[in-house]
Amino acid sequence: MTAEAREAGPQEGSAAGGERPLRIALLTYKGNPFCGGQGVYVRHLSRELARLGHQVEVIGAQPYPVLDEGEGLEGLSLTELPSLDLYRQPDPFRTPKRDEYRDWIDALEVATMWTGGFPEPLTFSLRARRHLGARRGDFDVVHDNQTLGYGLLGDVGAPLVTTIHHPITVDRQLELDAAQGWRRRASVRRWYAFTRMQRRVARRLPSVLTVSGTSRQEIVDHLGVSRDRVHVVHIGADTDLFSPDPSVPQVPGRIVTTSSADVPLKGLVFLVEALAKVRTEHPGAHLVVVGKRAEDGPVAQAIERYGLERAVEFVKGISDAELVDLVRSAEVACVPSLYEGFSLPAAEAMATGTPLVATTGGAIPEVAGPDGETCLAVPPGDAGALAAGLSRLLADPGLRVRLGSAGRERVLRHFTWAKAAEGTVARYREAIVRTAARPEPSAPRHPGRSAAEEAAAAGATVRAEAAVAARVTVAAEELVVPNRESRATC
């Protein structure tokens, strides 16, 4: 940990406030630390919780989380809670062999996938509930990382705290807005059917953490969670790893972004259009995208339309060190998203001292800071404004240095993982005290229903879906599943 980061957060190896260390179960239904914010969150939060002296057991499914190792992390461990891994590469949407099925939850998982839905939040929650029930008394607190499945309703053996990065209903609406034709819209609605479950579960949770004030408002508006049960704990960048290094040469004209080409929310198509405009003034400008290349769709079409095949490069599967050096080598980093619940790429780019052009979508301004002080801010979905910001920075080395330095300082003051861990532990202890003082569920129930009736209703929903799974499984081997990329492979 750098001296700067130590000043920004609590010291290693000590429980916050000198209180006894906690035994924490940290649940994550998807843990890839190189693709998607959930895996990054689990990796860095678990490390900093362990550095504070807590015992942290990460319980996750494929792709399994990758946890840090080293001095001070002896209390950090991983328990694998395997799914059928239906979205693994290189065969996403695969059909499991008969001997892979272990129980009715597996059947439910396959049946939901075969019928166009995304099963993992539900099926992981059911497996997690069974696992936690067999280990009652092992944990002081259970922390769910946005699973929001029916299995987590009711008693899971310890006080429950849940992180919602942002409501997935936002992603659903943006994909529906971008969908062309009724078949595509129907596919999007079916894929995101799990958001109905997440909405129902979220309203019954006693303690919800989120990563920004914008996400807090979205959770209240979209999920119907009471405002007083939603608490903001900002996450951050790994400021040891993402740091300036003058020995890494900058590549003239290089712009770097982290984005998936097939996710409309990320706004990559507007950045491609902006690049075409920028190159009229700066012919050497080029874009490196950390993410998956789309072989078709709006981004691929824009690259072809503007003749940018040699000016846009996609990289995927690179190491942490390679990612950091790539960001350091850029003259400008860009976050073109239409919406973000926090924006780790913005914080990480700023932590390296790379100047940032970012939209004002969602919580990005909370992270990136004021326009002209710590970044250049532009409206979301505006390729012209993006082009103007990028051109301005590429043409002005002094502005790049000033914004890069100010961005680094902003991250150190507000957005470190050490601070995130300290704030999270405070919420853990509140949940423990609240549960001890009032063991009854604090979340509102459906009018007229008792707690037992609520649990029975949730159980009936799961059993109904299981019955569908059993019927579908009988004849499912004759189904042909499209070999398409999953929006959930991260």
Image: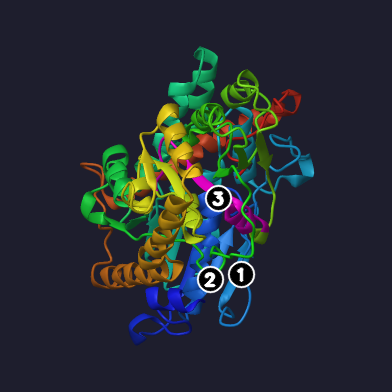
Q: Is residue 79 above or below residue 308?
A: below
**Label 2 belongs to which residue?**
47
Q: Decide if residue 436 is on the left or right side of residue 356.
A: left
Q: How is the image coloured?
A: rainbow
Q: Is residue 204 above or below residue 234?
A: above
**Label 1 belongs to which residue?**
68
Q: Quadrant of the C terminus?
A: top right
**Label 3 belongs to which residue?**
124
Q: Can you give x and y, in whole percent of width and height, for residue 132 in the image?
A: 51, 63
Q: What residue is shown at x 38% (from left), y 44% (from top)?
A: 376
For the residue carrying disc 1, how many other residues have a C-alpha within 10 Å: few (<14), some (14-19), or many (20+)?
some
Where, by quadrant of the figure, is residue 87 drawn? top right
Where, by quadrant of the figure, is residue 427 drawn? bottom left
Q: Can you give x and y, in whole percent of width and height, for residue 242 in the image?
A: 54, 62
Residues marked 1 and 2 touching at CB (< 8 Å) = yes
Q: Decide if residue 436 is on the left or right side of residue 84.
A: left
Q: Amino acid at mark 3?
A: Phe
**Earlier along the polypeptide chain: callout 1 or callout 2?**
2
Given the current orientation, which residue lies at the most extreme bottom position?
A: 18
Q: Is residue 228 magenta?
A: no
Front position among marks 3 and 2: 2
Please give the range of residues in magenta: 322-341
For the residue labelled by badge 1, is the local secondary structure a helix, a strand or a loop?
loop
